[in-house]
Image (tube, rainbow, N blue to C red):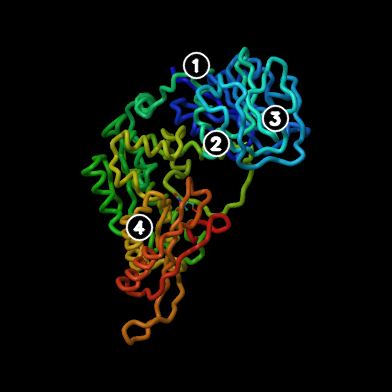
Amino acid sequence: MREIAAILDFGSQYTQLIARRVREAGVYCEIVDHTLTASDIEKIKPRAIILSGGPSSVLDAGSPDIDPAVLASGLPILGICYGIQLITKKLGGAVIRGTRGEYGPATIDVLDPQTIFHGLDRSLDVWMSHGDQVESVPSGFSVLASTDSCPVAAIGDDDRRIYGVQFHPEVVHTPFGTEILRNFLFRIAGLSGDWTMSRFIEESVEKIRRQTDRSTVICALSGGIDSSVVAALIDRAIGHRMKAIFVDNGLLRKREVEEIRSIFTEDYPLDITVIDARREFLDALKGVTDPEEKRKVIGKVFIDVFRREAEKVSDAHFLAQGTLYPDVIESRSVRGGPSATIKSHHNVGGLPKELGFELIEPLKELFKDEVRRLGRELGLPPRLLERMPFPGPGLAVRVIGEVTEDNLGVLRKADAIVKEEIRKSEHYRDIWQAFAVLLPVRTVGVMGDERTYANVIALRIVASQDGMTADWVKVPYDILGRISARIINEVRGVNRVVYDISSKPPSTIEWE
Ligand code: XMP
């Protein structure tokens, strides 16, 4: 029986981070909506509950609330930020509006070095981010820590096993935050932390076998980490009943098709079919310059090609998708609601329902870093697991303007040089993506004694945790210089290289 912790989400930007920290401690957890009733929550069978922070104030009418029966359930509870305030208010203490908010580093004095502060120093650096604060604790509670400006920085009731912290233990700026969470999970809730990747594999394999019975499962393999891990996991479960389809759309990087083929025939043999659909994609892209139009055309052709190939597989009732946990949470986040379409994302994880398959989504409980760990555990080779993310529409969104075979050829060469030089440098591990973009702009240059009039390549090198936000990387000048010199010397048709120094937001990572 899996040990589960439930995280009630009150809309904090850090809710996912709490979940990751809990899982890093070896405890499986799920993020659930704060509006769930105690009996809904009971169905998940949690052994511990964490209340997240949130942007609201418990003092405002209509602020996110909790079913009082959750607090009376007898389960161990830890409230973080908004969570401590809600516990205080609901159980009879008092919360006041701070005269001014407290945002940033603070040092707490630990008044009670037991329970959640067990084994830690009496003075701890923490990260605060709150407007309101607890003025008086509910009966049965005592103050466990305080700071000058926040006299009630942590509270606890040992009998009811309910605790609260005003600061954020889940962020890296609270250096001993993980220990505080572990104290709660292990010492207070009595969990053992036995959730491991090998256990996840065992459970998934069992589930996939049961779900698919004797029929065949099709995997749309993109060569990215998620779809590769899905294919490997399903292969582990049902072997030859898994058919992987890899579509070569002609928009891939240098030697990419060969590499994928060699990975899945030599390093990690799978039943893989590579479909050469280059002509079909390039024909459909003729004359298309608008970024959204490009994405739509590519998405449509992909579905046509995929449908054709899938129909050739007999007994196939299932289609595997690489949906991850953040996708699941995003679709029902308390902050959710309609957001503007910045780019219509295309990836193999988004095949339409009309294809008529039943879906298998074995990664939908996992975060990206857990998928990497799972891939390692399954024995996928590092050359696959260390690949940088690559968008579904491929190089088409990095050739600005019309996509032609010539343009793709120029970009591929430049891109390979960027990858080679970055891989050689010690910065490789800190980089989320490093690639070249071909601009439809020609500028004048001089080579030897000759005037040149050729295209510009932009370099995009960013650091990011999840692709949602990103910083441009301060790559040392000598590396940038080497990349520039090599591209201009080795790639015909390029006489200028520029470096993109924009962060996301307000820019995006890809140029289209
Ligand atoms: P943007 O350009 O939106 O990209 O800042 C964020 C991350 O997503 C990748 N990306 C895509 N991935 N299908 C994908 O699977 C797509 O259509 C797509 N568009 C962008 C991008 O490379 C970056 O890592």
Residue holding disc 1: 190
Q: Earlier in the sequence, mark 3 or mark 1?
A: 3
**Rendered image: mark on residue 174:** 2
Q: Secondary structure at mark 4?
A: helix
Viewer-nearest residue: 20 or 126: 126
Q: Earlier in the sequence, mark 2 or mark 1?
A: 2
Specify the farthest residue to the bottom.
Answer: 449
Callouts 2 and 1 close, C-beta under 8 Å = no
Q: In the rendered structure, which amino acid carries the disc numbered 2?
A: Thr
- Estimate the spatial distance between the alpha carbons at disc 4 and disc 1, rounded to whole Å: 46 Å
Q: Earlier in the sequence, mark 4 or mark 1?
A: 1
In percent of width and height, residue 44 lies at 53, 21
Quadrant assignment, res 316: top left
- Estimate the spatial distance between the alpha carbons at disc 2 and disc 3, rounded to whole Å: 18 Å
Quadrant assignment, res 231: top left
In percent of width and height, residue 140 lies at 69, 15
